[in-house]
Image (tube, helix red, strand yellow):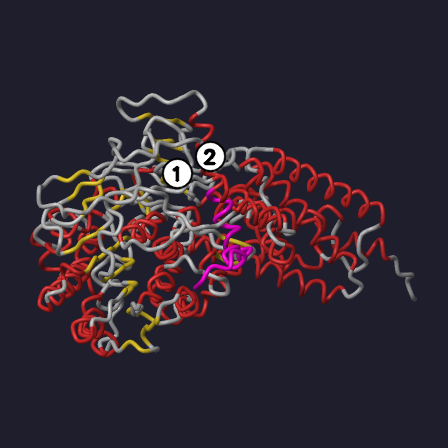
Amino acid sequence: MNRPYSGYTGRRNAGGPALSALFFPAALLYHELLLRAFDRSTPFFDLALLPTALFSIAAGLAVWLILDLLPWKTAGRVAGGVLLGLGTVLFCVERGCRATFNLYYGISFMGEMAGNVAGDFGSTVVQVVLGMVPFILLSFAPLAAFIPLRRRVVLDEGSEAPVRIILLAVLAACQLTAYLVCTLGPAKSYYTYEFTANAAIPHFGLFTTARLELEYAVAGTPTPPLDDFIDDPAGTPAPTGTTEPSAAPSAQTPDKPSLPPKDYGPNALDIDFAALAESESNETIQSIHQYMASVTPSQKNEYTGMFAGKNLILLTAEGFSPYAIDKELTPTLYRMTQEEGFVFTNFYQPDWTLSTIGGEFSVTTGVIPNWMNGGSSPTVSASRSMPITLPHLMAPLGYSTPAWHNHTFNYYPRDKYLPNFGYDYMGIGSGLEMAQSVANKWWPESDLEMMEETAGSYIDAYVKDGTPFHAYYMTVSGHGLYTWGGNDMSARHRAEVEAKYPNLSEEAQAYIACNMELDLALKYLVDKLEAAGIADDTLIVMAADHYPYLLVDEKSGADYYNELRGFEDQEGDTSRYKNTLLMWSGSIKEPIVVDTPCSSVDIVPTICNLFGLDYDSRLYSGRDIFATNYEADQYSNCMPLVVFANNMSRGNSWITAAGTYEANTKTFTPNEGVTVDDDYVKRVHRLVAAKVAYSKLIIQEDYYAALQLPG
């Protein structure tokens, strides 16, 4: 006897609309809460939990509705499983990034780096995965539940029209409410013009971040309120005298080089920004012109031209910090940063949230690095006009401009952006021979070997035919992992460090040990210069790419960096990013102490001033550290300013000659004896926002090309 088929009864037997509709919202919300729960740096219960939950529900309902409408139910179940699987993998990868680098990365960036990471750091990836086993197992719970429940989640006959309409209304209400919270609340900038994965994931969740990244990659990141950032034309009047304020560099020895009187005019080119703005049809470029017109140039000073016509060696040192300097274990570093040359007591290398590539960009360009439209300042700058870099300014004067990195030449796209900066770039696999490191499969490779293979080429050329040089190095010996088994350079110097610091943890010991290889590289370089008789004719400058964040174990909460420092702090505190700027020449026999607040974006404009180059100080995010046209207790847009663009939940910290603003606590602490106006903090906040916003637009919009500068 044939029984009539009832689709409604069949659906009831297989499952109900409640389970069907709730499964994907619950799965997405579960993943977001799991990622949040494992993140020690993000408060679990705060305002961000609301939009994260609402967006998760809305996204889950959208997935359910699409699968419910599909006429091919088997395909719908397969698609549901694939989506859950891919989402689970994405959450695990982001958790791995956060646990290893204390950062969240955009999907496009992870895609760009996947091949390099797998090829160069395979063993490290395995260690990271093993340390994430609990998270991974918990992450796969929704997929494990979906497989046996798939017929009850994706119903054979789909849901009835009223159910779909009601849940579509719920979807819209959740999405709209979350959108209003994000765009009207304190996190508005992170949802729009300051969007980065590192800031967005804690505020809105991973799936929303992925959606925004795709949206902005196609349509472009929203433009910030640029008019709000521009000071009155020419900025706040600043003193133009030649007397130095209290924050200026001071000599501690009569042997300081004696310089002839200088013209203390502005470090600026003849660029009529106001006229350019009037004739510009592109509103964003027009706004940048107007901003540049409002900036006060830094003044020339007694250090202008101090190294004119001489040689320059610039290094970005992997994971370098002051705690790598030891008078006995790293004597060359100690000599070059404490006993001779310029001694910078107030230098910082902020965490730009781009890891090595961001730090290198700040050191080599003087521009604040940013994430943008699925890319980053370094990657995007590879196809932009960059006339403000040192090679483009020095090569026309006859300088050779070689550059090296002692790891895979195209790890990060430095094989694209460094040549675009004007460097003749070589790395392992493209022009740099590192036979010993390669033969022994050392990780990381030896900084000393890189120096032995390269320094002679430009030094000999200078001695032989007088060709001046600007050489650049990106080192790697100081890279984590900081263990005896994770860093071959650490293992090489293990005995010396264990003998002197037997009570330090292995991680802290290994960090000091691997930097002994950097010290040997610098010793070789200085010895080579001195033997050639040109140490007095050469300036060596070195700064870190970032502090050694791999000394922080995000999974366990262990902070070996604080162990080295001897006191406690947390991510986001400005003191964590205090570092050392090495600026040494054989011509400076005694230390010249500089206590001006400064950071890595100040390096290029400072070098430009020291070498007496024709440059425009307004075109950089940073400033000449030695410029004195400011007063410590007064606001001006040419004053010393250290910007910390890494606090993803509370805004940007900053330091000026007047004091320090900590975004973690939202407090400004003036320096001793300094009193500022009531609106000082507000005005500096605006200046910080302007510098971050315009540094992004300058690269994104190819602004330097619009100026038609040479280079």
- Asked if the residues shown at circle 1 and circle 2 are in contact, with their CB atoms under 8 angstroms apart, the answer is yes
> Within 10 Å of the Cα at label 1, are there few (<14), some (14-19), or many (20+) other Cα atoms?
many
> Main SS type for the magenta part?
helix
- Does dot 1 land on a helix, a strand or a loop? loop
For label 2, the crowd category at 10 Å Cα-Cα, with few meaning under 14, some 14 to 19 and many 20 or more, is: some
Mark yes or no: residue 219 visible: yes
Instruction: Please tell me which residue lies in front, 535 or 41.
Output: 535
> Disc 1 residue type?
Cys
**Amino acid of disc 2:** Gly
Residue 482 image-quadrant placement: bottom left
Q: Locate residue 225, reporting x and y percent.
A: 59, 39
Q: Any mark on residue 638, and which?
A: 1
Provide the secondary structure element on which disc 2 rests. Answer: loop
Residue in the picture at 43% in, 52% down: 369
| Viewer-closest of 234 and 388 | 234
Tag of residue 235: 2
Q: Earlier in the sequence, mark 1 or mark 2?
A: 2
Q: Is residue 546 above or below residue 344?
A: below
Give the quarter of the figure containing the C terminus: bottom left
| Residue 94 in picture, x, y percent from top left | 47, 54
Q: Which residues are magenta?
A: 691-711
Number of callouts in the render?
A: 2
